[in-house]
Image (cartoon, helix red, strand yellow):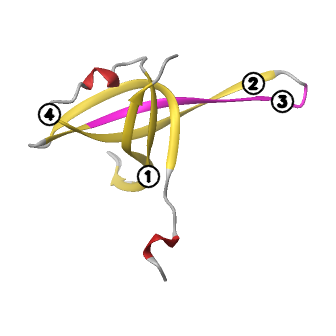
Amino acid sequence: MEYNQYINHVELQGIVGTSRVSNLGEKNAVSFSLATNYAFKDREGCHVIETTWHNCTSFADKEDDLSIYAKGTPLHIEGRLRNLRYTDACGCERTTIEVVASKVRRVEP
């Protein structure tokens, strides 16, 4: 089995919601939410817009401009999906999917 036989790639374009920066020494880890929309017509022919919020993480150099992660900024990101497991406050084990962004760029609205 060849290592590159499988693909884990995601590409999203949306609007930044909340963001948080953590210092990792040489780099910053930026955790942010990204809202994407999907438009369709329902059975009655009415236009519906479905918004999905994605949990994302990006790693940035210390000198990078982090203002692109401000709320309301339109971004285009490329990266991979990662499953995260954690235990919530009630002691229940939970799983969530996170987008680990390898490329992040601001887009015009």
Secondary structure at badge 4 equals loop
Where does the image place residue 39, in percent across and percent down from the top left? 71, 28
Q: Which mark is residue 42?
A: 3
The reply to whether dot 3 and dot 2 touch (C-beta < 8 Å) is: yes
**Mark 3 neighbour class, 10 Å CA radius: few under 14, some 14 to 19, many 20 or more:** few
State the separation of the CA atoms marked 3 and 1: 31 Å
Tell me: residue 80, above or below residue 41: below
Gap in angstroms between the C-alphas marked 3 and 2? 7 Å
- Which range of residues does the magenta coloring cover? 30-44
Mark 4 or mark 2, which is nearer to you? 4
The residue wearing badge 2 is: 48
Residue at which label 1 appears = 80
Q: Which residue lies furthest to the left in this view?
A: 25
Mark 2 falls on what kind of element?
Answer: strand
> Where 78 falls versus 67 (above or below)?
below
Q: What residue type is disc 4 on?
A: Lys
Image position, residue 70 (x, y; %): 33, 20
Callout 3 amino acid: Asp
State how far apart marks 4 and 3 are (Cα).
Answer: 46 Å
The residue under label 4 is 62
Residue drawn at the location 49% of the way across and 58% of the way down: 8
**Real-space CA distance between mark 4 and mark 2, rounded to the nearest whole angstrom:** 41 Å
Q: Earlier in the sequence, mark 4 or mark 2?
A: 2
Q: Which of 89 and 66 is in front in this view?
A: 66
Residue found 49% across the figure and 83% down from its top: 1
In the rendered image, residue 16, in percent from the top left (x then y), is placed at: 42, 25
